Image: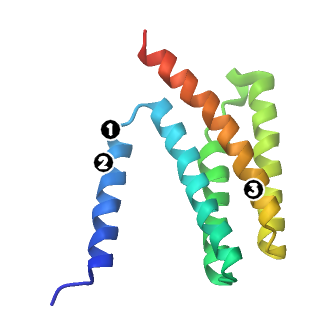
Protein backbone atom coordinates (compact mmCIF):
# COMPACT_ATOMS: atom_id res chain seq x y z
CA UNK A 1 0.00 0.00 0.00
CA UNK A 2 2.80 2.45 0.84
CA UNK A 3 6.06 2.91 -1.06
CA UNK A 4 9.37 2.24 0.52
CA UNK A 5 10.88 4.69 2.98
CA UNK A 6 13.61 5.35 0.41
CA UNK A 7 11.00 6.46 -2.13
CA UNK A 8 9.34 8.69 0.45
CA UNK A 9 12.69 10.24 1.35
CA UNK A 10 13.43 10.91 -2.32
CA UNK A 11 10.05 12.57 -2.80
CA UNK A 12 10.57 14.71 0.29
CA UNK A 13 14.05 15.72 -0.87
CA UNK A 14 12.70 16.57 -4.32
CA UNK A 15 10.05 18.84 -2.81
CA UNK A 16 12.72 20.49 -0.67
CA UNK A 17 14.94 21.13 -3.69
CA UNK A 18 12.01 22.46 -5.72
CA UNK A 19 11.10 24.81 -2.88
CA UNK A 20 14.71 25.99 -2.59
CA UNK A 21 14.86 26.67 -6.33
CA UNK A 22 11.53 28.50 -6.34
CA UNK A 23 12.61 30.82 -3.52
CA UNK A 24 16.28 31.30 -4.46
CA UNK A 25 17.76 34.45 -5.92
CA UNK A 26 20.00 34.19 -9.02
CA UNK A 27 23.20 33.99 -6.97
CA UNK A 28 21.76 31.19 -4.85
CA UNK A 29 20.76 29.31 -8.01
CA UNK A 30 24.31 29.45 -9.39
CA UNK A 31 25.70 28.16 -6.09
CA UNK A 32 23.07 25.39 -6.09
CA UNK A 33 24.20 24.34 -9.58
CA UNK A 34 27.80 24.08 -8.40
CA UNK A 35 26.70 22.11 -5.33
CA UNK A 36 24.65 19.74 -7.50
CA UNK A 37 27.53 19.07 -9.88
CA UNK A 38 29.97 18.54 -7.01
CA UNK A 39 27.58 16.13 -5.28
CA UNK A 40 26.96 14.17 -8.48
CA UNK A 41 30.71 13.85 -9.04
CA UNK A 42 31.32 12.73 -5.44
CA UNK A 43 28.85 9.92 -6.07
CA UNK A 44 30.50 9.13 -9.42
CA UNK A 45 33.86 8.96 -7.65
CA UNK A 46 32.47 6.45 -5.16
CA UNK A 47 30.96 4.49 -8.06
CA UNK A 48 34.41 4.23 -9.64
CA UNK A 49 35.84 2.96 -6.36
CA UNK A 50 33.02 0.37 -6.16
CA UNK A 51 33.20 -0.54 -9.87
CA UNK A 52 29.55 0.48 -10.29
CA UNK A 53 29.58 1.34 -13.99
CA UNK A 54 25.89 2.26 -14.39
CA UNK A 55 25.94 4.63 -11.40
CA UNK A 56 29.21 6.17 -12.58
CA UNK A 57 27.71 6.90 -15.98
CA UNK A 58 24.48 8.25 -14.52
CA UNK A 59 26.20 10.64 -12.11
CA UNK A 60 28.81 11.86 -14.59
CA UNK A 61 26.02 12.48 -17.10
CA UNK A 62 24.11 14.41 -14.46
CA UNK A 63 27.13 16.59 -13.72
CA UNK A 64 27.67 17.20 -17.45
CA UNK A 65 24.02 18.22 -17.74
CA UNK A 66 24.37 20.70 -14.87
CA UNK A 67 27.55 22.18 -16.33
CA UNK A 68 26.21 22.35 -19.89
CA UNK A 69 22.54 23.21 -19.44
CA UNK A 70 22.87 25.12 -16.18
CA UNK A 71 26.20 26.86 -15.76
CA UNK A 72 27.29 27.19 -19.39
CA UNK A 73 23.82 28.03 -20.70
CA UNK A 74 23.47 30.85 -18.17
CA UNK A 75 26.52 32.73 -19.43
CA UNK A 76 25.78 36.11 -20.99
CA UNK A 77 28.43 36.46 -23.67
CA UNK A 78 27.33 39.96 -24.65
CA UNK A 79 27.53 41.47 -21.18
CA UNK A 80 30.13 39.13 -19.74
CA UNK A 81 32.84 39.76 -22.30
CA UNK A 82 36.15 38.03 -21.73
CA UNK A 83 35.08 36.57 -18.39
CA UNK A 84 32.12 34.79 -19.98
CA UNK A 85 34.37 33.55 -22.79
CA UNK A 86 36.86 32.13 -20.30
CA UNK A 87 34.19 30.52 -18.15
CA UNK A 88 32.60 29.01 -21.25
CA UNK A 89 35.93 27.54 -22.30
CA UNK A 90 36.50 26.20 -18.78
CA UNK A 91 33.06 24.58 -18.71
CA UNK A 92 33.77 22.96 -22.09
CA UNK A 93 37.08 21.67 -20.71
CA UNK A 94 35.31 20.23 -17.66
CA UNK A 95 32.82 18.41 -19.87
CA UNK A 96 35.62 16.93 -21.98
CA UNK A 97 37.40 15.74 -18.82
CA UNK A 98 34.19 14.18 -17.53
CA UNK A 99 33.63 12.35 -20.80
CA UNK A 100 37.18 11.06 -20.48
CA UNK A 101 36.53 10.11 -16.84
CA UNK A 102 33.45 8.16 -17.79
CA UNK A 103 35.08 6.31 -20.68
CA UNK A 104 38.21 5.47 -18.69
CA UNK A 105 36.89 5.20 -15.12
CA UNK A 106 39.33 7.98 -14.27
CA UNK A 107 39.06 9.14 -10.69
CA UNK A 108 41.84 11.75 -11.21
CA UNK A 109 39.84 13.39 -14.02
CA UNK A 110 36.80 13.61 -11.74
CA UNK A 111 38.95 14.99 -8.92
CA UNK A 112 40.32 17.64 -11.30
CA UNK A 113 36.83 18.80 -12.28
CA UNK A 114 35.63 18.79 -8.67
CA UNK A 115 38.59 20.98 -7.68
CA UNK A 116 37.74 23.44 -10.48
CA UNK A 117 34.07 23.49 -9.51
CA UNK A 118 34.92 24.07 -5.85
CA UNK A 119 37.24 26.95 -6.72
CA UNK A 120 34.59 28.60 -8.89
CA UNK A 121 31.90 27.97 -6.27
CA UNK A 122 34.06 29.65 -3.66
CA UNK A 123 34.12 32.78 -5.80
CA UNK A 124 30.34 32.70 -6.20
CA UNK A 125 29.92 32.18 -2.45
CA UNK A 126 31.97 35.33 -1.86
CA UNK A 127 29.94 37.32 -4.40
CA UNK A 128 26.69 36.12 -2.82
CA UNK A 129 27.88 36.96 0.70
CA UNK A 130 28.96 40.43 -0.37
CA UNK A 131 25.63 41.07 -2.09
CA UNK A 132 23.76 40.06 1.07
CA UNK A 133 25.84 42.30 3.31
CA UNK A 134 24.85 45.41 1.38
Place of residue 104 in the rendered image (x, y in percent of width and height, measured from the top left): 84, 74
* Callout in the foreground (1, 3): 3
Of residue 5 and residue 89, the one placed in the foreground of this image is 5
Relative height, residue 102 to residue 34 (above, below): below
Place of residue 74 in the rendered image (x, y in percent of width and height, measured from the top left): 61, 39
Quadrant containing the N terminus in the rendered view: bottom left
Q: Is residue 15 left or right of residue 106?
A: left
Q: Quadrant of residue 99?
A: bottom right
Q: In terms of secondary structure, where does tag 3 sit? A: helix
Q: Which mark is residue 19?
A: 2
- The residue at which mark 1 appears reads as 23
Q: CA distance from mark 2 to mark 3?
A: 30 Å
Q: In terms of secondary structure, where does tag 2 sit? A: helix
Instruction: Please report contact status of discs 2 and 1: CB closer than 8 Å, yes or no.
Output: yes
Place of residue 79 in the rendered image (x, y in percent of width and height, measured from the top left): 68, 21
Q: CA distance from mark 2 to mark 1?
A: 6 Å
- The residue at which mark 3 appears reads as 111
Of residue 31 and residue 23, the one placed in the foreground of this image is 31
Of residue 126 and residue 85, the one placed in the foreground of this image is 126
Q: Quadrant of residue 73?
A: top right
Relative height, residue 7 to residue 107 (above, below): below
Instruction: Please report contact status of discs 2 and 3: CB closer than 8 Å, yes or no.
Output: no
Amino acid sequence: MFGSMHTANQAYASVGVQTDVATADPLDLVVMLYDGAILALATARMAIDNNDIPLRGQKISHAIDIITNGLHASLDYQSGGELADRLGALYNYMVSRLIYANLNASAPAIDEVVALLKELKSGWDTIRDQARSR
